[in-house]
Image (cartoon, rainbow, N blue to C red):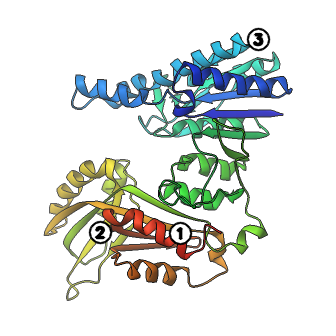
């Protein structure tokens, strides 16, 4: 078997953890598997580098930030290869460039365009364990890029697809995918398997187990992914294609996201093209908008448009929106950051009714007001006040019987 194993920052947090990872890798190699390892930077390293950059400049350039931040994973890959070699196995460390990960030129959140993987295939044929620096790639003009927070997950899944690996294992600090955050609801249950669609919704809605784009990639190319802990040998959660058993479960999980901010453009003229101009400007700045609500127009002349963006993009979006609001003849722009998104997810919703009403009823019984609502075939999301996040998670988890 060809196995791609990805280890997150907590799994490679120090020399002892790196040695423990090397032992796990060596065990797989001893069993006769070909192994490609993808590593993140050591826990805290990326934040440390960002802190250093901010000490140097209040507005560091994105190209130089990518070059700086990519160094964290390079350090870990070299150390991990050394640790595997110390156990008697041939190992070689590759940067994103040496792996042949070609991306577009959008710095700090680049998208993978292709992976050549020529050197990797040759090294695998020569029985090397390959250790790849995750989270990074290179443009067609040889500039270093990074793939956004959690980008090592994407590196691993994309490499698994490019090399036609039999399995992609994502090792992290949790045992697998749970029905919700066990830190908030201790009775949360680990799922044996989950569909790509459910995992994609949970990841995009705030579950931090897998990066959203890595799940999109796995679903598109049908890469079998197992999420498991690097701290024990417990079986993890398989992320795979939907099957009939999954449809029997109405709700699979409750997710929350505190990295949300709500922007409202007030009293905008109610005429065609206004929303298009606003959201085109935001899209051109590479800002992802999540939920959008346009209120019923006031006397047929004006309306309010509210939308949510990641809190990390809120100031940039506010400045952009205020600039365009003048052009749109709006009366003003409000920013609210004390909000959270709470969501219930399950492929069973396609064939079962009443999930939304049960969710709204449960929140109402506990005095939690809903500001915005968004639905899809397999999810219902609500924007609520930040202070009610943990309460909402617990009561919804209980209401849908997820601990059973």
Whole-number angstrom distance, CA of label 2 to CA of label 3: 59 Å
The part of the image, by quadrant, that contains residue 26 is top right
- Residue 172, which numbered label? none
Q: Earlier in the sequence, mark 2 or mark 1?
A: 2
222 or 348: which is nearer to us? Answer: 348
For mark 2, what is the residue?
306
For mark 3, what is the residue?
88
Instruction: Examine the rendered structure and indicate whether residue 222 appears above or below residue 3.
Output: below
**Residue 84 in picture, x, y percent from top left:** 69, 16
For mark 1, what is the residue?
397
Horizontal placement of 238 versus 205: left or right?
right
Which quarter of the rendered picture does the C terminus lie within? bottom right
Whether label 2 touches label 3, CB < 8 Å: no
Q: Earlier in the sequence, mark 2 or mark 3?
A: 3
**Residue 21 in picture, x, y percent from top left:** 65, 26
Q: Residue at x 52, y 33 (%)?
A: 10
Which quarter of the rendered picture does the N terminus lie within? top right
Horizontal placement of 245 versus 290: left or right?
right
Whole-number angstrom distance, CA of label 2 to CA of label 1: 28 Å
Whole-number angstrom distance, CA of label 1 to CA of label 3: 48 Å
Horizontal placement of 290 versus 203: left or right?
left
Q: Secondary structure at mark 1?
A: helix
Q: Secondary structure at mark 2?
A: strand
């Amino acid at each position: 078997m060809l196995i791609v194993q990805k280890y997150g920052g907590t799994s490679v947090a120090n020399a002892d953890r790196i040695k423990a990872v090397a032992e796990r890798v060596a065990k797989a190699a001893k069993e006769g598997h070909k192994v490609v390892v993808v590593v993140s930077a050591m826990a805290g390293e990326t934040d440390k580098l960002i802190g250093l950059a901010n000490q140097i400049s209040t507005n560091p350039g994105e190209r130089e930030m990518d070059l700086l931040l990519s160094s964290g994973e390079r350090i870990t890959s070299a150390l991990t290869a050394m640790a595997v070699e110390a156990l008697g196995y041939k190992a070689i460390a590759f940067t994103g460039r040496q792996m042949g990960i070609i991306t577009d030129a959008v710095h700090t959140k680049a998208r993978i365009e292709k992976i050549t993987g020529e050197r990797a295939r040759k090294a695998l044929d020569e029985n090397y364990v390959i250790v790849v620096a995750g989270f990074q790639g290179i443009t067609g003009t040889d500039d270093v890029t990074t793939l956004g927070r959690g980008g090592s997950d994407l590196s691993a899944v994309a490499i698994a697809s490019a090399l036609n690996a039999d399995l992609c294992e994502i090792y992290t600090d949790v045992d697998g995918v749970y029905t919700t955050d066990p830190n908030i609801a201790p009775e949360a249950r680990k799922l044996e398997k989950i569909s790509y669609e459910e995992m994609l919704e949970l990841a995009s809605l705030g579950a931090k187990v897998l990066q959203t784009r890595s799940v999109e990639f796995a679903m598109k190319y049908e890469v079998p992914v197992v999420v498991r802990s690097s701290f024990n040998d417990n079986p993890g959660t398989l992320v795979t294609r939907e099957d009939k058993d999954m449809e029997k479960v109405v709700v699979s999980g409750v997710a929350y996201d505190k990295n949300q901010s709500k922007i409202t453009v007030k009293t905008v003229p109610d005429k065609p093209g206004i929303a298009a101009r606003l959201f085109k400007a935001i899209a051109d700045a590479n800002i992802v908008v999540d939920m959008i609500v346009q209120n019923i127009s006031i006397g047929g002349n004006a309306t309010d448009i509210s939308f949510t963006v990641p809190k990390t993009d809120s100031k940039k979006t506010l400045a952009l929106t205020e600039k365009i609001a003048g052009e749109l003849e709006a009366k003003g722009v409000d920013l609210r950051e004390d909000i959270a998104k709470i969501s219930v997810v399950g492929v069973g919703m396609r064939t079962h009714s009443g999930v939304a009403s049960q969710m709204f009823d449960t929140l109402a019984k506990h005095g939690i007001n809903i500001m915005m609502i968004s639905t899809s075939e397999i999810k219902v999301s609500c924007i609520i006040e930040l202070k009610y996040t943990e309460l909402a998670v617990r009561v919804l988890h209980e209401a849908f019987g997820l601990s059973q």
